[in-house]
Amino acid sequence: MIKVILKFREVAEKLFIILALLIFTEPLVGQAHEKMGQFRLDDPSQADPVLRAVRWGTYAIILILLIPQWQKALDVAARDKLLWVMIGISLASAAWSELPKLTLRHSIGLGATTLFGIYLATRYSLKEQLQLLAWMLGISALLSLVFATALPTYGLHYDGWRGIYWNQNNLGRWMCLSAIIFLILALSSRRHRWILWAGFGLSAALIWTSTSQTALIVFVGILALLPASKALQRYSPAPFPWLIAAGILGCGIIWWVIGNMDIVTSLLGKDITLSQRTSLWEAVLVKIRERPWLGYGYGAFWSAVGIKDAHILPILGPNVAGKSHNGFLDLWLDLGLFGVLAFALQFLSKLPQVIACIRSRQTPAEFWPMTCMTFTVLYNITESTLLTQHSIFWAVYVATILSMSPAAIQPAEPEKEEKSNV
């Protein structure tokens, strides 16, 4: 009887997490606001009282679930000191923020989102985290397919599919993550492989139908990294000549892209300003130079300064919630150079653990930390998901880096090792 109760509790907890992850992707929020005539072209969720209540209710349940494991949760949270430096800077920024109360409120939201990541790292292994994300993203993909085909009024947006999300870029972002996770699981698992390949195929198709160029580029970029990570796993000494050659080739490609932006953007169906992003970045850099060290306070710039600036407002338009469409610039605006350096140091400090995780030959989690960190960097070049409150991307990033403990990346026992095909 006790075993049945424990099993039921375990299943119920996983179902709750899958539902919570799905809710935090904000499905159908944009469609609901359109129906009510509340048009905001960027983020309609901030003023939604129902979504806000659901978020904080979810955080409360997560906190309750962590109480029996509080000692382990503290040990997990203590694995990355620089993570808490960033949270500390965001809280301290209320002292110099343009809107101190808003900064404090947003910083608390960031702390709660980080708590979500701590919970995932405390309760589940990297493999289990991937499986939970695959369940959530699989449901999201199926619902998006249904909405785009059976309910086109809700599921289509301009010239592409948006599924259950606010616009095509949001669908592309989630399906990019979905395709990568399903691919890692499909190439690493022996059971139910056809389901995982179907999830990969559907997710990849939805990237294409979303017409999101950012999602497509990030997806292809990460696909190109998987063979390199497999080579790093296969050879016990680091293949330095190959790494140097890959670095030189990568720099050459980047140099060519920069020198031929007109060709690249025309192939992607964009203008040379990447939908006016570069113009926005130039205006944002001017504001950064005014307060380079500490920034404007976490979450304060786009609520107090940016949306009123004479140079930025014409680019955004009067009804668009502001952001730089670059996570690193937004981080600089929020926390200044100190915040950017804290993230850079935190990110770089994890790279040795990423390599150790790949070489550990654990399956399928060995490739996920590298993939997650690459996804975070690439997506924040043209989007803003870095150090963001109520963002599953941030919660997943926190869970991933905290799950790379020495115990988690020890080489698998030969008899328990599952062959990876990545």
Image (tube, rainbow, N blue to C red):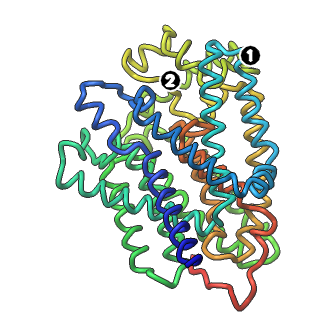
Q: Residue furthest bottom?
A: 415
Can you see residue 55? Answer: yes
Name the amino acid, label 2. Answer: Leu
Q: Is residue 80 left or right of residue 373?
A: right
Please provide percent x and percent y for residue 286.
62, 16
Q: Locate the C terminus and report the quarter of the image it occupies.
A: bottom right
| Residue nearest the viewer, comparing 64 with 128 | 64
Residue hosting label 2: 280
- Give above or below for 195 relative to 393: below
Instruction: Tell me which numbered mark, 2 or 1, is placed earlier along the sequence.
Output: 1
Q: Label 1: how many residues lie within 10 Å, few (<14), some (14-19) or many (20+)? A: some
Q: Is residue 389 left or right of residue 321?
A: right
Q: Label 2: how many residues lie within 10 Å, few (<14), some (14-19) or many (20+)? A: many
Picture disc at residue 401: none
- Asked which quadrant contains residue 281, the reply is top right
What is the secondary structure assignment of the residue under circle 1? helix
Residue displayed at 47% across by 64% down = 134
Residue hosting label 1: 95
Q: Is residue 62 left or right of residue 156?
A: right
Please provide percent x and percent y for residue 290.
68, 12
Residue displayed at 53% across by 38% down = 56
Please provide percent x and percent y for residue 163.
30, 49
| Residue nearest the viewer, comparing 414 with 374 | 414
Q: Nearer the viewer, mark 2 or mark 1?
A: 1
